[in-house]
Amino acid sequence: MVLDINNTPSVEPETLEGLLEEGYLLIDVREQDEWDAGHHKNASHLPMGEIVEKVDNFNNDEKYIFVCRSGARSGRVTSFMISKNIDSYNLSGGMKQLNNFSDEIYDLHGNSGQII
């Protein structure tokens, strides 16, 4: 775990698979078309615009990793969730970087996904 430029706790994409095995939950905050084109097979989808209204659905006993295309949106979500005392981390470099380290990116139909 590291702090990114905005002092947001972040994880590096090459460590994601191990963290998921440890029980961390991956939340993809991109828009529907981005999700449909390619997402991590173990991610849940919750667009950034819905986070505030669904913050009560997050469990304080869980650890969350947020991801977007490049890390900017998910960084903002991570900061917001931390302000709500939710154990949260941003995935550094987002899906663009994760795509270099993971074979688990699929489209809506289960085919190899693309990051848009």
Image (spheres, rainbow, N blue to C red):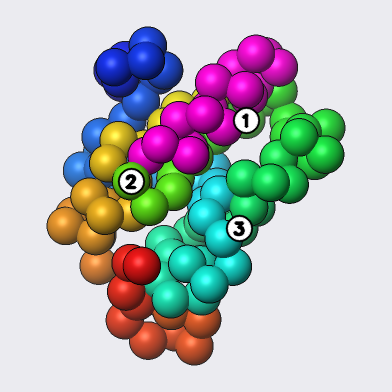
Q: Examine the rendered structure and indicate whether residue 40 appears above or below residue 71.
A: below
Q: Is residue 108 left or right of residue 60?
A: left
Percent from the top left, x then y, of residue 101? 18, 54
On residue 45, the disc is 3
* Disc 3, SS: strand
User: In which quarter of the view is residue 86 placed?
Assistant: top right
Q: Would residue 105 be visible to someone looking at this image?
A: no
Closer to viewer: mark 1 or mark 3: 3
Query: What residue range appears in magenta?
Result: 71-86
Closer to viewer: mark 2 or mark 1: 2
Determine contact: label 2, label 3, CB under 8 Å: no
Q: Tag 3: residue type?
A: His
Q: Nearer the viewer, residue 62 or 99?
A: 99
Percent from the top left, x then y, of residue 25? 54, 43
- Identified at 43% across, 76% down, the residue is 37
Is residue 84 located in the magenta-colored stretch of the structure?
yes
Q: Nearer the viewer, residue 94 or 112?
A: 94
Closer to viewer: mark 2 or mark 3: 2
Q: Which residue is mark 1?
A: 62
Q: Tag 1: residue type?
A: Glu
Sequence-wise, the earlier of marks 1 and 3 is: 3
- Identified at 30% across, 19% down, the residue is 4
Q: Would residue 90 be visible to someone looking at this image?
A: yes
Real-space CA distance between mark 2 and mark 1, rounded to the nearest whole angstrom = 24 Å
Percent from the top left, x then y, of residue 1? 31, 21
Percent from the top left, x then y, of residue 79? 54, 21
Real-space CA distance between mark 2 and mark 3, rounded to the nearest whole angstrom = 16 Å
Q: Tag 2: residue type?
A: Ser
Q: Which residue is mark 2?
A: 70
Q: Is residue 47 left or right of residue 106?
A: right
Which quarter of the rendering shows the C terminus? bottom left
